[in-house]
Image (cartoon, rainbow, N blue to C red):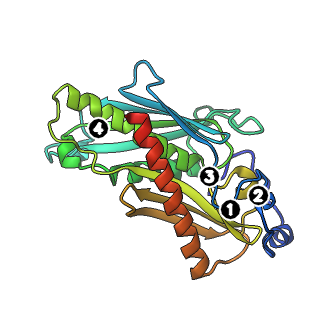
Amino acid sequence: MARQSGLRLWASASYLAEVNKSPTQGADMRPSGRKLDEMRTVSIEAGVMKHAEGSCLIKMGDTHVLCSASIEEKPPSFLKGTGLGWVTAEYGMLPRATGGRTKREAAMGKQSGRTQEIQRLIGRALRAGVDRSALGERQIVVDCDVIQADGGTRCASITGGWVALRLAVNKLMKAGVIVSDPMIDHVAAVSCGVYAGQEVLDLDYAEDSVAGTDGNFVITGRGRMIEVQMSAEGATFSRDEMGKLLDLAEAGVAALVAAQKAAVA
């Protein structure tokens, strides 16, 4: 569902139907030449920012997102006196993250509905992997800034955001500020969809822009579902197709969790 503001060209219904009506055999059916169940090359470089308590640069193919985590020793007002902590997120795209320049939202005076939707998703996803009682009355803000977009920016933000959050919590534990690790599980996300009549893993923009069915899957390291977003963009989907996409997503998230573990080791 990675809709890149200012870049997406809406395909006609007839073109979408033509792209998605019949399967093409082999890797050549994907614009990138990848196999149906093959992810883009993933890299996570931790500790890329000097001042942030936690940070990383995640690259999923040509989608690059800079993630940072900042600790605030004061919880939101609605949590004061509850003993609970909070994890929230902010998301944005650099003007030339896409093929054409997109105006900065700050210059327009407000965030787009897309931006608000994505950053709320990131916050919800990351909180699902945190014991907020163990975190204590403080807030960690995860900032996800898209440097370059080629589909799947929200998924990359969640996966990289978890790494930044993990590193920030490590600093709290090392300083003795908290004694019990509040990070209860990994959290990662990947997109899957039906492209040219076939279920595929990790959509890039060329696929995402014309996919018949498009979904984002947020899953824990133990395989528990946090959030599933699926929609029929150009063609409806069956329960069987949904199951196949879930299978692909689980395999993709397992690979992403392995990358997270390597990044924070």
Disc 3 is placed on an element classified as loop
Q: Quadrant of residue 241?
A: bottom right
What residue does disc 4 label?
139
Outermost residue to the top: 50
Q: Are marks 1 and 3 in contact (CB under 8 Å)?
A: no
Q: Nearer the viewer, mark 1 or mark 4?
A: 1
- Local packing at callout 2 (Cα closer than 10 Å; few below 14, some 14-19, many 20+) is many
Task: Kindly identify which numbered label has been placed on residue 18.
Answer: none
The kind of residue tagged 3 is Met
Q: Quadrant of the C terminus?
A: top left
- Local packing at callout 4 (Cα closer than 10 Å; few below 14, some 14-19, many 20+) is many
What residue does disc 2 label?
30
Task: Kindly identify which numbered label has been placed on residue 36.
Answer: 1
The kind of residue tagged 4 is Gln
The kind of residue tagged 1 is Leu
Q: Nearer the viewer, residue 131 or 241?
A: 241
Distance from label 1 to label 4 (Cα)? 40 Å
What residue does disc 3 label?
39
**Residue drawn at x 24%, y 47% as measured from the top left:** 78
Distance from label 1 to label 3 (Cα)? 9 Å
Disc 2 is placed on an element classified as loop
**Residue drawn at x 27%, y 41% as measured from the top left:** 76
Badge 4 or badge 2: first in the primary sequence: 2
